[in-house]
Every structure is written in structure tokens, then in C-alpha cells.
């Protein structure tokens, strides 16, 4: 829901004082400038935690029409389950010992997760006690853009933004225009790390100083957690 004009003015006036105002303005501008958000093709998730830090905002775009049922989405949003699923395929079975070694989970924890995933028909078990993804279980392709908002500490913001590449395809730092100069003076560090840089001024206008470089998420399990959380939110909003 969009804030009333007096609320919007408050956030403009406190842009350089409160990070929550910066985040609000960023969300407002994204909704204003991206038609895909307004028509539902993209979703905004607030303070999304995918085990790589908590991004202030994440914009998620589903690139196909595949849908995960609510019960399966809830299971996918759990990191233990996501670790297991990230190692499974539909044609190359994985043994219990392989999964224990690769996930780092205890055998007891792993068996509990496997039972849950079997019951929900996310995975299947072969006669030799190896595991595959269920033929009917489809994981949608989702593009995640993560945004880290900071008033002053661009170094901390840059570090945190790089962590989001665990689950995100693109990662951005957002700062007030008034305080952006130190970051711009070090923009080569942003470029090297593939992180985009955006500023917002007291009039509610934003400038992209550097576009984020698109990446493949570096941690498949964290990426799957993000997909699970996206679809869980879809069912509860």
C-alpha cells in the first residue's frame, strides 16, 4: 500500500537520517518505475534472509510459469531441506553416504529431512536406498535483485552486498545522494565486485551510478531458500 503524501514527505525529509526512510523511498521508486512490479510479474520481499545476511529489499522475477504448491514451498524455504534438494537430480541418484558427506549434516538430521521430502513427493527413493528428485517436482527459474541500503558506511554496504551473491543474481548498494561521494570515489571496488551503486536525493529521484553485474548465485541451497520464501509470501499475501 502506498503511503499518504504527508508520510511520503516525512520519508523524504528523513532520507539522510534514517535507513528505513531510504528503504521506503527505494521501494516506492522501484514500484513507480518498474511495470512488472505493478502487474505482479515481479515481487518485492522485505528484509529477506537467505543465510547470506538480511537484504533490505529483494525484487524477485519468476521467468516461467512453474508454480510450487504452498506445502512444498514451505519445505524448500528451510535450509536443511534446500541443501538436500540442491544435490539431487532426476536421473543421477545420490546415496545416503554421499548426501551426508556433501551436506555436512548428521545422518539423523539428513534422514529426517529425507522422510519429510519423500512424504511431500519432492524426492523419490530407489530400491538401493539412493535418492532422486521426483519427476513432477519443478523448480521455477527466478531472478533475484538484492538491495543493501546504507546512510554512510559504503564499505560495510559493499561487503554485505557481495554476500548476497550467495542467492542473488544482481546486488546493489543504495545511499542518499548527499553521502554518495566516498562510494563514487571508490566505484572501481564496486565494479570489481560486480555490485551496482544507486543514490536517492531529497526530491525522491534516483540515479544509477553503476549497473550491477549479473551473476549465477554462488550457493544453490541459498538460492532455493529464496525461491521457497518467494512462493510462501505469494500464498500469504
Image: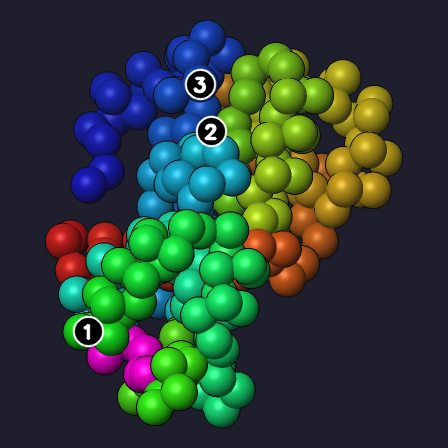
Q: Position of residue 200 (x, y in %)?
A: 55, 28
Q: Quadrant of residue 9?
A: top left
Q: Nearer the viewer, mark 2 or mark 3?
A: 3
For the N terminus, the image quarter is top left
Relative side of 18 to 121, left or right: right
User: Which residue matches tag 3?
Assistant: 19
The residue at the point 30 percent across, 88 percent down is 136
Relative side of 132 to 101, left or right: left
The residue at the point 70 percent across, 21 percent down is 155
Vertical order, 74 against 140 (above or below): above
Inter-mark Cα distance, 1 to 2: 47 Å
Q: Which mark is residue 235?
A: none
Q: Which numbered disc, 1 or 3, marks the residue that appears first in the sequence? A: 3
Inter-mark Cα distance, 1 to 3: 41 Å
* Local SS, label 1: loop
Vertical order, 60 against 12 (above or below): below
Relative side of 4 to 127, left or right: left
User: Which residue matches tag 1?
Assistant: 120
Along the viewing direction, whichever of 151 and 138 lies nearer the viewer: 138
* Local SS, label 2: loop
The residue at the point 63 percent across, 15 percent down is 153
Q: Residues within 10 Å of mark 3 (few under 14, many from 20)?
A: many
Along the viewing direction, whichever of 14 and 124 lies nearer the viewer: 124
Magenta residue span: 121-125
Q: Residues within 10 Å of mark 2 (few under 14, many from 20)?
A: some
Q: Residues within 10 Å of mark 1 (few under 14, many from 20)?
A: some
User: Which residue matches tag 2?
Assistant: 204
In this view of the protein, can residue 164 be seen by the observer? yes
In this view of the protein, can residue 57 be seen by the observer? no
Vertical order, 55 against 225 (above or below): above
Whether the residues at callouts 2 and 3 have beta carbons within 8 Å, the answer is no
Q: Position of residue 148 (x, y in %)?
A: 53, 32
Amino acid at each position: 500500500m502506498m503511503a499518504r503524501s504527508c508520510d511520503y514527505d516525512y520519508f523524504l525529509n528523513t532520507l539522510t537520517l534514517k535507513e528505513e526512510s531510504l528503504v521506503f523511498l527505494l521501494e516506492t521508486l522501484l514500484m513507480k518505475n518498474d511495470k512488472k512490479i505493478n502487474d505482479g510479474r515481479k515481487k518485492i520481499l522485505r528484509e529477506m534472509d537467505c543465510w547470506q545476511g538480511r537484504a533490505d529489499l529483494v525484487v524477485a522475477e519468476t521467468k516461467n510459469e512453474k508454480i510450487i504448491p504452498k506445502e512444498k514451498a514451505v519445505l524448500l524455504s528451510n535450509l536443511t531441506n534446500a541443501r538436500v534438494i540442491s544435490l539431487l537430480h532426476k536421473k543421477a541418484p545420490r546415496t545416503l553416504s554421499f548426501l551426508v558427506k556433501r551436506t555436512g549434516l548428521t545422518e539423523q538430521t539428513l534422514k529426517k529431512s529425507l522422510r519429510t521430502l519423500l512424504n511431500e513427493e519432492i524426492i523419490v527413493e530407489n530400491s538401493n536406498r539412493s535418492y532422486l528428485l521426483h519427476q513432477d517436482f519443478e523448480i521455477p527459474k527466478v531472478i533475484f535483485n538484492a538491495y543493501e541500503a546504507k546512510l554512510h558506511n559504503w564499505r560495510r554496504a559493499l561487503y554485505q552486498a557481495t554476500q548476497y551473491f550467495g542467492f542473488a543474481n544482481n546486488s546493489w548498494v543504495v545511499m542518499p545522494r548527499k553521502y554518495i561521494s566516498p562510494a563514487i570515489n571508490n566505484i572501481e571496488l564496486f565494479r570489481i565486485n560486480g555490485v551496482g551503486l544507486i543514490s536517492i536525493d531529497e526530491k525522491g529521484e534516483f540515479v544509477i551510478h553503476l549497473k550491477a553485474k549479473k551473476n549465477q548465485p554462488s550457493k544453490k541451497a541459498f538460492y532455493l531458500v529464496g525461491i521457497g520464501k518467494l512462493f510462501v509470501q505469494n500464498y500469504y499475501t
